[in-house]
């Protein structure tokens, strides 16, 4: 009887979460500069970040900085971060500008020397989400918390830290906005707009 109740609760929770996740896969292009001498860490971090976004049916297409389209999100690194630059932060995004993320690689290495790739992956997810949400906000739980505590860091190391439901909705809204803006900027739409206004 107890086991049946637990199974039902798990299924209800999974169904509620699944209701948020969209059926069609969404696409997002991320261009990442090379953090010199850290190829293994970069590759592992991309895998972590891709997995987190794949869990909400968002597919990340990673590109090198030299082949970055204007609509992409651009990630750069600092290896010698000034002490007073966003003191205590591992990275920062420019959500109102909508394109740039800067990661403080030296702080990541200092914070989690044995789990840099996982921490970098989740830091990328956090900052990419700021860009997609288009505002400076944090959630009370999950990836978008302002500060990750001990339990969150354990979740990061094991790949279990996830998005709060409100962040999934805001990510989709941000992707919708980015796609509509890109569609409006396409040459065919510009020509149609010009014809319609004359």
Image (tube, grey):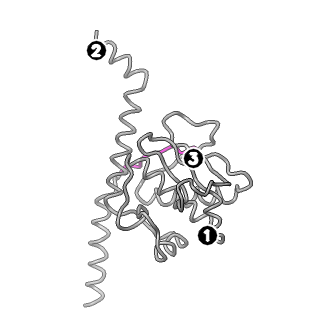
Question: Mark 3 sits on what residue?
Answer: 75
Quadrant where the N terminus is found in the figure: bottom left
- Of tags 3 and 2, the one toward the viewer is 3
Would you identify the image quadrant in which residue 56 lies? bottom left
Q: Nearer the viewer, residue 160 or 127?
A: 127
Q: Earlier in the sequence, mark 1 or mark 2?
A: 1
Identity of the residue furthest to the front in this view: 84
Residue 40 falls left or right of residue 159: right
Q: Earlier in the sequence, mark 3 or mark 1?
A: 3
Q: Residues within 10 Å of mark 3 (few under 14, many from 20)?
A: many
Identity of the residue furthest to the top in this view: 198
Question: Mark 1 sits on what residue?
Answer: 112
Q: Earlier in the sequence, mark 3 or mark 2?
A: 3
Q: Nearer the viewer, residue 38 or 135?
A: 135
Q: Secondary structure at mark 1?
A: loop
At a point 41% along the width and 54% down the height, the residue shown is 57
Dominant SS in magenta:
strand
Q: Is residue 65 magenta?
A: no
- Compared to residue 115, the image places residue 50 above or below, namely above
Q: CA distance from mark 3 to mark 2?
A: 38 Å
Q: Which residues are magenta?
A: 24-31
Q: Position of residue 163 (x, y in %)?
A: 39, 62
Q: Position of residue 137 (x, y in %)?
A: 37, 55
Q: Position of residue 196 (x, y in %)?
A: 28, 14
Q: Residues within 10 Å of mark 2 (few under 14, many from 20)?
A: few
Q: Nearer the viewer, residue 181 or 60?
A: 181
- Of tags 1 and 2, the one toward the viewer is 1
Q: Nearer the viewer, residue 115 or 106?
A: 106
Q: Secondary structure at mark 2?
A: helix
User: Which label is found at residue 196?
Assistant: 2
């Amino acid at each position: 009887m107890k086991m049946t109740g637990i199974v039902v609760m798990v299924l209800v929770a999974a169904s509620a979460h699944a209701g948020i996740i969209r059926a069609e896969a969404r696409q997002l292009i991320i261009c990442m500069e090379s953090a010199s001498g850290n190829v293994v860490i970069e590759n592992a971090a991309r895998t972590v970040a891709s997995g987190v976004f794949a869990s909400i049916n968002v597919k990340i297409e990673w590109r090198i900085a030299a082949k970055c389209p204007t609509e992409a999100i651009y990630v750069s690194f600092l290896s010698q971060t000034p002490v007073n630059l966003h003191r205590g932060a591992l990275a920062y995004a420019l959500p109102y500008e909508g394109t740039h993320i800067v990661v403080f690689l030296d702080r990541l290495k200092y914070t989690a020397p044995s789990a840099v790739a996982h921490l970098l992956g989740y830091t990328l997810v956090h900052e990419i989400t700021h860009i997609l949400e288009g505002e400076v906000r944090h959630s009370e739980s999950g990836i978008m918390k302002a500060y990750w505590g001990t339990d969150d860091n354990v979740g990061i190391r094991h790949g279990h830290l996830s998005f709060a439901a409100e962040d999934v909705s805001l990510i989709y809204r941000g992707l919708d906005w980015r796609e509509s803006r890109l569609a409006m900027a396409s040459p065919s739409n510009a020509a149609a707009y010009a014809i319609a206004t004359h």
